[in-house]
Amino acid sequence: MQKCLVLNTLPLTEIKRAKLRETYGSFLQMTQKCFALVETSKVKSSTELHRLTYREHRKRFGVAAQLVCEARRYAWGVRKTANRINYVIVRFDRHLFSLKTTRRGNPALSVRANSERVGLPIAQDGGWRRLQTHLGAGWEISSVIMKFNLKFLVALRKDDPQKRESPNVLGVDINAGSVAVTIRSAKGKVLKQLYLGQDLARMQAKFERRRAKLQAHRDTHSQSKAGKKLKRFSRRQRNYTRTRCWQLVGELVKLAKRFDARIAIERLKYLRKRRGEWGKRSRKKVNRIPYGFLRFALEHKAVQEGITIETVSARYTSQTCPRCDLVNKANRRNFHYFKCIRCGFEANADRVASLNICRRAGERMVTYAQVPVVGGAVNRRVLSDDGGRRHLNHLEGQAPSFRAG
Ligand SMILES: [Zn+2]
C-alpha cells in the first residue's frame, strides 16, 4: 500500500529557497540531459544510461549520488510518455532526508540540497497531524518529494494487511436508485439486509435537472453567465459524488468488519446503455451511477482494511429466484418488483440481486454459460455439490420448495 500526503513548511528564508531552487535546477538539468540522450541515441537500458551520464553529472553538479540516479530513473521512466521535460518532481530517498526536532521542540524536515543539508521548519497544521496519525498506524515514510514550487509531499508505505477468508458474505448490488446490501452467513442465513446511498441517486437527479436548466439558458441567451456557472456546477457535482462514494464505501467496509464478512460484487460488465437501448429516462437513470469509481474506492478501502473482495458472475442476478432458482425474465415484473412466476416469491428486485450475489459467492456455483441447454431444463441451475438437489432453506421460515423436472 502506498499513499502520498502533503507536508507544509513554514515560510522559508530567501537563502533556503535559493538552495532548494538550485537543487531543483540541477535535478531538472540532469533529467533533461538524460532524456535527450535517450531520445537521440539508442540507449538500450537504464543501466547503460547510468554508465553514460553518472560520472559527468556527479562532477558537474556536485549533488548526492542518489539524486543523480534518481534523475536518470526519472528520465528513463517518462521516455515513452513525454516529448520533452519541462518540469520535474525531485524525490529525496531515505538517505537524503530526515525528520528532526529543533531545540525548541518543533518539527523540521532536513533535506540534502546540492552541497549541504537544509533544515526546513514544518507547519504543524492538519497535514502534519494527518502524517502523525499515519505514522502511529504503522505507515513508514519511503521518500520526500519536492515540487517545482518548492512544496513538499511525503510518500508513505505500509505492508498489506494479512487477508483471511471470512466465513460470511456481504453482497453488494449497485443500482440506479441505491446500493442494495445483503449479509449472509456461511450457513445461508440472511443476517442483515439494507439499502445505502439513496440520497446519492436523488442528488444526482437534482444536479441533472439544474444542469439542464443552465444549459438551456446558455443556449438561448448569448450574453448570459450560464456557461461559466455550468462549469463551476459540474465541479461541484463531481466533488459531491466522489465524497459520497467514499462515505458509502466506508459504510460498506464497516459493515463487513462488523459481520466478519468478505465482500462480493458483480464482475464488471457492460452497463452503460446507449441510444436505442431502453427508454431515455431509464437510460439516464442507469448511466449516472458512478460504477467505476465506486468499485475503485471499494477495492482501495478493502485492501487497507484487509478485507477480501470476491467477484461473481453478473448474469441474471436480478432474474433468478433465490427460493427456487428459476431464471426467467418474467420474474422481474418491473424496475423494482420481483415476483417468481413459479413459486411466487416476491421482493424488491435490487434486494434479490444482492442476495443472489451473496449466494454465488458462497457456493462458487457453476455459471449459467456452462449449463448445457437441454429441453425444459434450460433455466435450471446446475449445482455441483449434491447432484442438483438441495434444500433451499436459506430464507428464514421458508420451506424447501417444489422443483419441477
Ligand atoms: Zn421461485
Image (tube, rainbow, N blue to C red):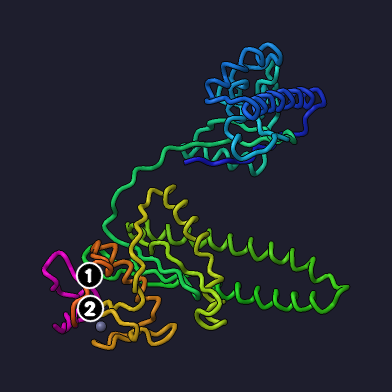
- Magenta stretch containing residue 382, yes or no? yes
Q: Within the image, what quadrant is residue 129 found in?
A: top right
In the image: residue 299, left or right of residue 117: left
Ligand 1 occupies quarter: bottom left
Which secondary structure class fits the magenta region best?
loop
Instruction: Name the element at disc 2.
Output: loop
Residue type at tag 2: Val
Relative depth, front residue between 369 and 312: 369
* Along the viewing direction, whichever of 100 and 395 lies nearer the viewer: 395
Residue lying farthest left? 387
Work out which residue is located at the far right of the displayed protein and give it.
Answer: 223
Is disc 1 surrounded by few (<14), some (14 to 19) or many (20+) residues within 10 Å? Answer: some
The stretch of residues the image draws in magenta is: 376-405
Q: Which residue is mark 2?
A: 378
Q: Is residue 390 above or below residue 48?
A: below
**At which x and y percent is residue 93?**
57, 26
Label 2 residue near ligand 1, CB within 8 Å: no
Which quadrant holds residue 22?
top right
**Residue at left 15%, top 84%?**
404
Image marks 2 and 1: residues in contact by CB distance under 8 Å: yes
